[in-house]
Amino acid sequence: MPSGLICVARIGAPHGVRGAVRLWSFTADPFAVSDYGPLVTKDGARQFEIASAREAKSHLVVTLKGVATRDEAERLNGVELYVARDKLPPTEADEYYHADLIGLAAVTTAGDALGKVVAIHNFGAGDIIEIAPPSGPTLLLPFTNAVVPTVDLAAGQVVIELPNEIEGDTPNHPEA
């Protein structure tokens, strides 16, 4: 992916027969996706401009300049759209772009290495940080101040306070 690009939306299935598409916006204000100017594909090879947008149930319905038919819209299903980072507003304190977190080292509060941050998810109940250890399954932890008390972008790491017990784990001590 070209450096300095941030994914701000994903095109979904067509909507109607005139080339409109469903669009999942990843910006705090879903309509802000149209404020950043032309959106580009991951490889930078294609560029899209939003001609119009309206709110739907859990997404936007947009028309893109140059996309006039359902067939053209169908070919765009699943395409992620990016903007140059410098077009996005600066983050507030304790606010981060997911792209800034991906790849950071994850360490415990004692300084022991846990792995690398590979994704940030949100399935509707809050952000989840996914950490890939050097071996074994990934860890999915709540991205809260209690579990992730420190994000140090300059040092390239997040500090993780592991919960005492994760549901499904076998406790180290038998219940009396």
Image (cartoon, helix red, strand yellow):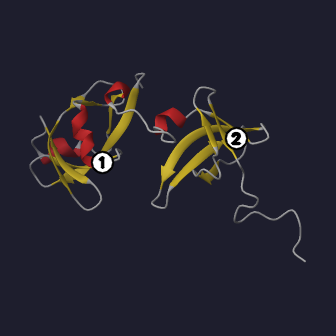
Q: Where on the picture, by quarter, is residue 105?
A: top right
Coordinates of residue 17 in the picture (x, y in percent): 10, 52
Residue at the far top in the pictured view: 3
Residue 97, above or below 1: below
Coordinates of residue 25 in the picture (x, y in percent): 31, 46
State left or right for residue 30 relative to residue 125: left
Residue type highlighted by circle 2: Pro
Residue 134 marker: none
Tell me the residue at 9%/49% (across/down).
Answer: 18
Say whether disc 2 or disc 1 marks the residue closer to the N-terminus.
Answer: 1
Q: How far is mark 2 from mark 1, CA to CA?
A: 34 Å
Image quadrant occupied by the N terminus: top left
- Closer to us: 130 or 107: 107
Coordinates of residue 122 in the picture (x, y in percent): 47, 53
Mark 2 lies on a secondary structure that is loop
Residue 76 appears anywhere in the view: no
Residue 168 appears anywhere in the view: yes
Q: Name the residue under label 2.
A: 133
- Closer to us: 120 or 88: 88
Q: Name the residue under label 1.
A: 29
State left or right for residue 161 relative to residue 176: left
Residue at the far bottom in the pictured view: 176
Q: Where on the picture, by quarter, is residue 114?
A: top right
Residue 152, above or below 127: above
Q: Where on the picture, by quarter, is residue 115?
A: top right
Image quadrant occupied by the C terminus: bottom right
Coordinates of residue 128 in the picture (x, y in percent): 55, 52
Residue 89, above or below 129: above
Residue type highlighted by circle 1: Asp
Mark 1 lies on a secondary structure that is loop
Crowding near pointer 1: few (<14 within 10 Å), some, many (20+)? few
